[in-house]
Amino acid sequence: MKKVILTGDRPTGKLHLGHYVGSLLNRVLLQDTYTQFVMIADVQALTDNFEHPQKIIENVYEVARDYLSVGLDPQKTTFFIQSQIPEITELTLYYLNLVTLGRLERNPTVKTEIHQKKYEDSIPAGFFCYPVNQAADITIFKADLVPVGQDQVPMIEQTNEIVRKFNRIYDTTCLKEAKVLLGDTSRLVGIDGKSKASKSLGNALFLSDTPEEIKHKVFAMFTDPMHIRLSDPGHVEGNVVFTYLDAFYKDKEELAALKAHYERGGLGDTTLKNLLNETLQNLLAPFREKRESFQTKDLKEILFSGTTQARKVAQETMREVREAIGLNYF
Protein backbone atom coordinates (compact mmCIF):
# COMPACT_ATOMS: atom_id res chain seq x y z
CA MET A 1 0.00 0.00 0.00
CA LYS A 2 1.07 3.57 -0.67
CA LYS A 3 2.32 5.59 2.27
CA VAL A 4 0.13 8.47 3.42
CA ILE A 5 0.87 12.20 3.38
CA LEU A 6 -1.17 14.71 5.40
CA THR A 7 -0.57 18.43 5.17
CA GLY A 8 -2.57 21.62 4.92
CA ASP A 9 -2.87 25.36 5.36
CA ARG A 10 -4.87 27.84 7.40
CA PRO A 11 -7.22 29.86 5.14
CA THR A 12 -6.28 33.26 6.54
CA GLY A 13 -5.22 34.56 3.13
CA LYS A 14 -3.85 33.54 -0.22
CA LEU A 15 -0.73 31.36 -0.28
CA HIS A 16 2.74 32.75 -0.99
CA LEU A 17 6.19 31.66 -2.17
CA GLY A 18 7.12 30.54 1.33
CA HIS A 19 4.32 27.99 1.17
CA TYR A 20 5.45 26.97 -2.31
CA VAL A 21 9.07 26.13 -1.44
CA GLY A 22 8.27 24.94 2.07
CA SER A 23 5.51 22.48 1.25
CA LEU A 24 3.50 22.91 -1.96
CA LEU A 25 6.27 21.86 -4.32
CA ASN A 26 6.80 18.64 -2.39
CA ARG A 27 3.07 17.93 -2.44
CA VAL A 28 2.97 18.23 -6.23
CA LEU A 29 6.03 16.03 -6.67
CA LEU A 30 4.75 13.31 -4.32
CA GLN A 31 1.08 13.08 -5.26
CA ASP A 32 1.79 10.38 -7.85
CA THR A 33 3.51 8.05 -5.41
CA TYR A 34 1.67 8.65 -2.12
CA THR A 35 -1.90 8.70 -0.88
CA GLN A 36 -2.11 12.42 -0.14
CA PHE A 37 -4.61 14.38 1.96
CA VAL A 38 -4.46 18.17 1.89
CA MET A 39 -6.50 19.98 4.52
CA ILE A 40 -7.85 23.51 4.51
CA ALA A 41 -7.62 24.14 8.26
CA ASP A 42 -10.52 26.52 8.86
CA VAL A 43 -11.03 25.38 12.49
CA GLN A 44 -7.41 26.18 13.33
CA ALA A 45 -7.69 29.50 11.52
CA LEU A 46 -10.59 30.45 13.79
CA THR A 47 -8.43 30.04 16.91
CA ASP A 48 -6.98 33.51 16.30
CA ASN A 49 -9.59 34.87 13.88
CA PHE A 50 -12.77 33.94 15.73
CA GLU A 51 -14.14 37.47 15.44
CA HIS A 52 -13.81 37.44 11.65
CA PRO A 53 -15.26 34.13 10.39
CA GLN A 54 -16.13 35.59 6.99
CA LYS A 55 -12.43 36.14 6.31
CA ILE A 56 -11.83 32.42 6.87
CA ILE A 57 -14.81 31.29 4.80
CA GLU A 58 -13.82 33.40 1.79
CA ASN A 59 -10.20 32.30 1.91
CA VAL A 60 -11.13 28.59 1.88
CA TYR A 61 -11.77 29.02 -1.84
CA GLU A 62 -8.71 31.21 -2.40
CA VAL A 63 -6.46 28.54 -0.88
CA ALA A 64 -8.13 25.85 -3.00
CA ARG A 65 -7.42 27.95 -6.10
CA ASP A 66 -3.79 28.22 -5.10
CA TYR A 67 -3.57 24.44 -4.66
CA LEU A 68 -4.92 23.83 -8.14
CA SER A 69 -2.80 26.56 -9.71
CA VAL A 70 0.53 24.99 -8.68
CA GLY A 71 -0.44 21.56 -9.98
CA LEU A 72 -2.16 19.70 -7.16
CA ASP A 73 -4.62 17.38 -8.88
CA PRO A 74 -7.90 16.43 -7.13
CA GLN A 75 -7.76 13.09 -8.97
CA LYS A 76 -4.50 12.33 -7.15
CA THR A 77 -4.77 14.42 -3.97
CA THR A 78 -7.75 14.52 -1.62
CA PHE A 79 -8.64 18.10 -0.66
CA PHE A 80 -10.86 18.50 2.39
CA ILE A 81 -12.19 21.16 4.78
CA GLN A 82 -11.26 20.54 8.41
CA SER A 83 -14.52 21.77 9.99
CA GLN A 84 -16.58 19.33 7.94
CA ILE A 85 -14.95 16.32 9.62
CA PRO A 86 -16.25 16.34 13.23
CA GLU A 87 -14.22 13.23 14.07
CA ILE A 88 -11.12 15.45 14.15
CA THR A 89 -12.69 17.52 16.92
CA GLU A 90 -13.58 14.38 18.87
CA LEU A 91 -10.03 13.05 18.63
CA THR A 92 -8.67 16.44 19.72
CA LEU A 93 -10.68 16.20 22.94
CA TYR A 94 -9.24 12.77 23.75
CA TYR A 95 -5.71 14.04 23.07
CA LEU A 96 -6.16 17.03 25.38
CA ASN A 97 -6.23 14.59 28.28
CA LEU A 98 -2.71 13.48 27.35
CA VAL A 99 -1.01 16.89 27.13
CA THR A 100 -0.02 19.20 29.98
CA LEU A 101 -0.15 22.99 29.94
CA GLY A 102 3.58 23.01 30.59
CA ARG A 103 4.26 20.98 27.45
CA LEU A 104 2.15 23.34 25.35
CA GLU A 105 4.00 26.32 26.81
CA ARG A 106 7.34 24.79 25.79
CA ASN A 107 6.35 24.38 22.13
CA PRO A 108 8.70 26.87 20.40
CA THR A 109 6.35 27.45 17.47
CA VAL A 110 3.51 28.39 19.80
CA LYS A 111 5.80 30.60 21.89
CA THR A 112 6.88 32.50 18.77
CA GLU A 113 3.32 32.96 17.54
CA ILE A 114 2.10 34.10 20.97
CA HIS A 115 4.76 36.81 20.89
CA GLN A 116 3.95 37.80 17.29
CA LYS A 117 0.24 38.10 18.06
CA LYS A 118 0.90 39.89 21.38
CA TYR A 119 -1.11 37.26 23.29
CA GLU A 120 1.19 37.17 26.33
CA ASP A 121 -1.44 38.48 28.76
CA SER A 122 -4.53 36.97 27.16
CA ILE A 123 -4.01 33.73 25.24
CA PRO A 124 -7.20 32.21 23.78
CA ALA A 125 -7.43 28.58 24.97
CA GLY A 126 -8.25 27.37 21.47
CA PHE A 127 -5.12 28.96 20.06
CA PHE A 128 -2.95 27.69 22.91
CA CYS A 129 -4.14 24.13 22.26
CA TYR A 130 -4.02 24.14 18.48
CA PRO A 131 -0.94 21.84 18.37
CA VAL A 132 -3.18 19.15 19.87
CA ASN A 133 -5.75 19.74 17.15
CA GLN A 134 -2.96 19.51 14.60
CA ALA A 135 -1.92 16.17 16.08
CA ALA A 136 -5.48 14.94 15.56
CA ASP A 137 -5.38 16.08 11.92
CA ILE A 138 -2.21 14.13 11.25
CA THR A 139 -3.03 10.96 13.10
CA ILE A 140 -6.65 10.55 12.10
CA PHE A 141 -5.37 9.90 8.56
CA LYS A 142 -2.44 7.81 9.83
CA ALA A 143 0.04 9.99 7.98
CA ASP A 144 3.51 8.61 7.36
CA LEU A 145 4.91 11.93 6.11
CA VAL A 146 4.01 15.57 6.76
CA PRO A 147 5.52 18.12 4.33
CA VAL A 148 6.11 21.29 6.36
CA GLY A 149 8.41 24.25 6.79
CA GLN A 150 11.14 24.24 9.43
CA ASP A 151 8.99 26.25 11.84
CA GLN A 152 6.43 23.43 12.03
CA VAL A 153 8.87 20.67 13.02
CA PRO A 154 8.07 21.08 16.76
CA MET A 155 4.42 20.36 15.94
CA ILE A 156 5.30 16.97 14.47
CA GLU A 157 7.49 16.18 17.46
CA GLN A 158 4.60 16.92 19.80
CA THR A 159 2.25 14.86 17.64
CA ASN A 160 4.52 11.83 17.98
CA GLU A 161 4.71 12.29 21.74
CA ILE A 162 0.91 12.11 21.87
CA VAL A 163 0.87 9.00 19.69
CA ARG A 164 3.36 7.20 21.91
CA LYS A 165 1.47 8.13 25.06
CA PHE A 166 -1.91 7.11 23.63
CA ASN A 167 -0.63 3.75 22.38
CA ARG A 168 1.07 3.05 25.71
CA ILE A 169 -1.84 4.02 27.96
CA TYR A 170 -4.47 2.19 25.93
CA ASP A 171 -2.25 -0.75 24.95
CA THR A 172 -2.83 -0.35 21.23
CA THR A 173 -1.01 0.20 17.96
CA CYS A 174 -3.87 1.94 16.20
CA LEU A 175 -2.02 5.26 15.91
CA LYS A 176 1.25 5.75 14.06
CA GLU A 177 4.06 8.30 14.29
CA ALA A 178 4.75 10.63 11.38
CA LYS A 179 7.97 11.87 9.84
CA VAL A 180 8.75 15.41 8.73
CA LEU A 181 9.39 16.11 5.05
CA LEU A 182 11.19 19.43 4.52
CA GLY A 183 11.46 21.25 1.20
CA ASP A 184 14.82 22.17 -0.30
CA THR A 185 14.23 25.69 1.01
CA SER A 186 12.50 24.98 4.30
CA ARG A 187 12.21 28.61 5.44
CA LEU A 188 11.87 31.59 3.09
CA VAL A 189 12.62 34.97 4.61
CA GLY A 190 10.15 37.81 4.04
CA ILE A 191 10.91 40.56 1.54
CA ASP A 192 11.79 42.84 4.47
CA GLY A 193 14.56 40.47 5.54
CA LYS A 194 13.40 40.58 9.16
CA SER A 195 11.46 37.33 9.59
CA LYS A 196 9.93 34.45 7.64
CA ALA A 197 7.56 35.25 4.78
CA SER A 198 4.11 35.52 6.32
CA LYS A 199 0.57 36.43 5.33
CA SER A 200 -0.03 38.16 8.64
CA LEU A 201 3.19 40.19 8.54
CA GLY A 202 2.51 41.43 4.99
CA ASN A 203 6.05 40.65 3.81
CA ALA A 204 5.36 37.89 1.30
CA LEU A 205 5.15 37.42 -2.46
CA PHE A 206 1.83 35.72 -3.16
CA LEU A 207 1.27 33.07 -5.81
CA SER A 208 -1.57 35.21 -7.19
CA ASP A 209 0.31 38.56 -7.26
CA THR A 210 0.03 40.58 -10.47
CA PRO A 211 3.14 41.33 -12.56
CA GLU A 212 3.11 44.87 -11.16
CA GLU A 213 2.91 43.64 -7.56
CA ILE A 214 5.74 41.18 -8.11
CA LYS A 215 8.02 43.85 -9.56
CA HIS A 216 7.17 46.33 -6.80
CA LYS A 217 7.95 43.79 -4.07
CA VAL A 218 11.19 42.65 -5.69
CA PHE A 219 12.49 46.20 -6.00
CA ALA A 220 11.55 46.87 -2.36
CA MET A 221 13.69 43.96 -1.16
CA PHE A 222 16.51 44.45 1.34
CA THR A 223 19.98 43.96 -0.13
CA ASP A 224 23.18 45.29 1.47
CA PRO A 225 23.04 48.79 3.02
CA MET A 226 26.84 49.11 2.64
CA HIS A 227 26.66 48.46 -1.10
CA ILE A 228 26.15 52.11 -2.04
CA ARG A 229 28.23 52.47 -5.21
CA LEU A 230 28.46 49.97 -8.04
CA SER A 231 32.14 49.43 -7.31
CA ASP A 232 31.59 48.67 -3.62
CA PRO A 233 32.06 45.05 -2.52
CA GLY A 234 28.72 43.59 -1.44
CA HIS A 235 27.56 41.00 1.06
CA VAL A 236 25.62 37.94 -0.09
CA GLU A 237 24.81 36.69 3.41
CA GLY A 238 21.56 38.24 4.62
CA ASN A 239 20.86 39.73 1.19
CA VAL A 240 17.18 38.98 0.49
CA VAL A 241 17.58 39.15 -3.29
CA PHE A 242 20.21 36.43 -3.22
CA THR A 243 18.07 34.40 -0.80
CA TYR A 244 15.26 34.37 -3.36
CA LEU A 245 17.63 33.71 -6.25
CA ASP A 246 19.00 30.72 -4.31
CA ALA A 247 15.44 29.40 -4.02
CA PHE A 248 14.18 30.07 -7.54
CA TYR A 249 16.99 30.71 -10.04
CA LYS A 250 17.76 27.43 -11.78
CA ASP A 251 21.27 28.08 -13.16
CA LYS A 252 23.30 27.51 -10.00
CA GLU A 253 26.68 27.94 -11.74
CA GLU A 254 25.71 31.35 -13.07
CA LEU A 255 24.32 32.29 -9.66
CA ALA A 256 27.62 31.35 -8.00
CA ALA A 257 29.43 33.61 -10.50
CA LEU A 258 27.02 36.46 -9.75
CA LYS A 259 27.67 36.08 -6.01
CA ALA A 260 31.43 36.23 -6.55
CA HIS A 261 31.06 39.30 -8.78
CA TYR A 262 28.85 41.03 -6.20
CA GLU A 263 31.28 40.28 -3.37
CA ARG A 264 34.26 41.78 -5.21
CA GLY A 265 32.26 44.78 -6.48
CA GLY A 266 31.04 45.94 -9.87
CA LEU A 267 27.58 44.36 -9.83
CA GLY A 268 24.59 46.56 -9.05
CA ASP A 269 21.50 45.75 -6.99
CA THR A 270 19.25 46.84 -9.87
CA THR A 271 20.78 44.20 -12.15
CA LEU A 272 20.12 41.52 -9.55
CA LYS A 273 16.58 42.69 -8.91
CA ASN A 274 15.81 42.70 -12.63
CA LEU A 275 17.06 39.11 -12.82
CA LEU A 276 14.95 38.08 -9.82
CA ASN A 277 11.90 39.87 -11.16
CA GLU A 278 12.21 38.05 -14.49
CA THR A 279 12.70 34.72 -12.68
CA LEU A 280 9.61 35.16 -10.50
CA GLN A 281 7.46 36.50 -13.34
CA ASN A 282 8.23 33.35 -15.35
CA LEU A 283 7.48 31.13 -12.35
CA LEU A 284 4.20 32.76 -11.31
CA ALA A 285 2.61 33.63 -14.67
CA PRO A 286 1.33 30.08 -15.38
CA PHE A 287 0.11 29.72 -11.80
CA ARG A 288 -1.86 32.95 -12.07
CA GLU A 289 -3.36 31.99 -15.44
CA LYS A 290 -4.46 28.57 -14.22
CA ARG A 291 -5.77 30.02 -10.95
CA GLU A 292 -8.14 32.36 -12.77
CA SER A 293 -9.68 29.50 -14.76
CA PHE A 294 -11.47 27.97 -11.73
CA GLN A 295 -14.94 29.14 -10.76
CA THR A 296 -16.28 28.91 -7.22
CA LYS A 297 -18.75 26.20 -8.24
CA ASP A 298 -15.84 24.06 -9.49
CA LEU A 299 -14.06 24.51 -6.19
CA LYS A 300 -17.14 23.57 -4.18
CA GLU A 301 -17.52 20.32 -6.12
CA ILE A 302 -13.86 19.42 -5.62
CA LEU A 303 -13.96 20.21 -1.90
CA PHE A 304 -17.25 18.39 -1.30
CA SER A 305 -16.01 15.25 -3.05
CA GLY A 306 -12.66 15.29 -1.26
CA THR A 307 -14.17 15.98 2.15
CA THR A 308 -16.60 13.08 1.71
CA GLN A 309 -13.70 10.73 0.94
CA ALA A 310 -11.58 12.05 3.80
CA ARG A 311 -14.38 11.67 6.34
CA LYS A 312 -14.71 7.96 5.58
CA VAL A 313 -11.06 7.49 6.50
CA ALA A 314 -11.45 9.58 9.66
CA GLN A 315 -14.51 7.59 10.75
CA GLU A 316 -12.61 4.32 10.48
CA THR A 317 -9.71 5.64 12.58
CA MET A 318 -12.15 6.91 15.21
CA ARG A 319 -13.78 3.50 15.38
CA GLU A 320 -10.37 2.05 16.28
CA VAL A 321 -9.63 4.87 18.77
CA ARG A 322 -12.95 4.45 20.60
CA GLU A 323 -12.42 0.70 20.76
CA ALA A 324 -8.92 1.19 22.19
CA ILE A 325 -10.20 3.52 24.90
CA GLY A 326 -13.25 1.37 25.56
CA LEU A 327 -15.92 3.77 24.32
CA ASN A 328 -17.73 1.08 22.32
CA TYR A 329 -20.87 0.74 24.38
CA PHE A 330 -23.29 -0.31 21.67
Image: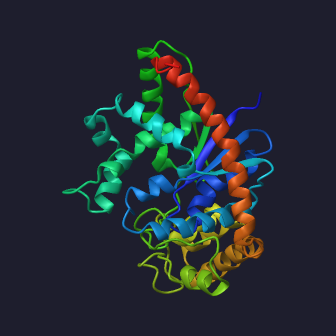
Task: Please say if 269 is above or below 104.
Answer: below
Q: Residue at x 45, y 75 (%)?
A: 224
Seen from this angle, which residue lies furthest front? 330
- Depth check: give the residue in front, 182 or 222: 182
- Depth check: give the residue in front, 65 or 203: 65
Residue 199 placement (x, y as % from top left): 48, 68
In screen coordinates, is 80 left or right of 107?
A: right
Q: Residue 325's image quarter?
A: top left
Task: Please say if 20 is above or below 62.
Answer: above
Residue 45 placement (x, y as % from top left): 45, 58
Q: Is residue 78 visible?
A: yes
Residue 40 placement (x, y as % from top left): 58, 55
Task: Please say if 212 is above or below 89.
Answer: below
Total label count? 0
Q: Residue 243's image quarter?
A: bottom right
Q: Residue at x 70, y 77 (%)?
A: 281
Residue 120 placement (x, y as % from top left): 22, 56
- Depth check: give the residue in front, 100 or 110: 100
Q: Quadrant of the N terminus?
A: top right
Q: Residue 314's image quarter?
A: top right
Task: Please say if 3 is above or below 43.
Answer: above
How was this image coloured?
A: rainbow
Q: Residue at x 76, y 53 (%)?
A: 74
- Depth check: give the residue in front, 303 or 278: 303
In screen coordinates, is 79 left or right of 128?
A: right
